[in-house]
Amino acid sequence: MKLAVSMAGDPDRPALILLHGWPHSRKIYDGVIEQLGTRYFTLAFDLPEIGESRGTPPSAEKRVLADIVISAAEALGAKSIVVAGFDVGGMIAFAAARHHGDRIVGAVPMNTVIPGLHPWRNVIANPDIWHFAFHSVPDLPELLVTGHQRAYFDFFFDLLAGRAGAVTNEMRETFTAAYSRPEALKAGFDWYRAFKEDAKVNAVPARIDVPILYIRGDADFGSIDDYIGGLRLSGANNLRGHMIANCGEFLPIEAPEAFIKALAEFAPR
């Protein structure tokens, strides 16, 4: 398996892993990676099979994907690692803290619900989040979306952005291209198909000592207090939350300076 990565900064500095979600690629961090690289050894990965990454992972469970990205960063010399991500990338960041806490020094889940943790049941029951169920159906999403990726993805870009036009046409084309291969599209849907197992694992509380910063844009669905409460009940005992104003899901492009500031105040130097 080979993961595509964009890197900035000195490998001797503490490392910061940046993870995308659905339906994005590592390119969503292009506007912030150089500035973050002045403080950290910053690595933005394409998740397995997405964009320029190749190789099907053994599972789409988030603890497995966390191991894959951390191992890739370690192979590049990363140390004192913080894992940050939004959407599915945020689920992976949490899995890194829960399952690989001895390999990282911090985790930053952003704009995501963690499978199995409050308010998970409320989220999956919300008709506005219909795609969680649809994407988990075997084969059917691939059949219906193939050849229509751009139109389908536009729905999510428009729904989840805090302001119209935040995701430019150029970005939309870039993200669509990242899922143009059948293997890539399947990999994205497989993240959802693994939610049931992710939720089963996460529903059992475990002591999590790794510092966690949960970030949420104030235009995204739900109250941050619900998400913080769910994380605390899961066993996270070194936890704090942070809201970013006038922002939806796409923090690196909707509020780049606030995004960088929040990471810089949390991650070690």
Image: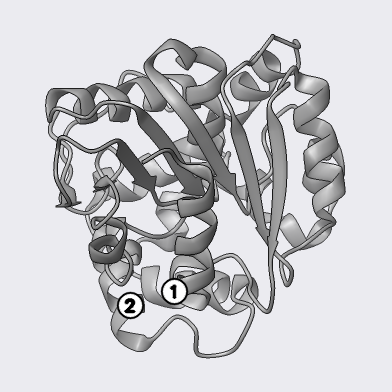
**Quick one: label 1, few (<14), some, or many (20+) residues within 10 Å?**
many
- Left or right, residue 193 beside residue 202: left
Residue 151, percent from left and from top: 45, 78
For the point 62% across and 49% down, which residue is it?
134
Residue 137, percent from left and from top: 57, 39
Which of the 4 image quadrants contains residue 111? Answer: bottom right
Q: Secondary structure at mark 1?
A: helix
Q: What residue is shown with label 1?
A: 253
C-beta proximity under 8 Å, tags 1 and 2 = yes
Query: Closer to the camera, 201 or 256?
Result: 256
Identity of the residue furthest to the front in this view: 269
Q: What residue is shown with label 2?
A: 171
Residue 260, percent from left and from top: 45, 62
Q: Earlier in the sequence, mark 1 or mark 2?
A: 2
Reply above or below: 186 against 81: below
Reply above or below: 46 against 94: below
Q: Amino acid type of disc 2?
A: Met
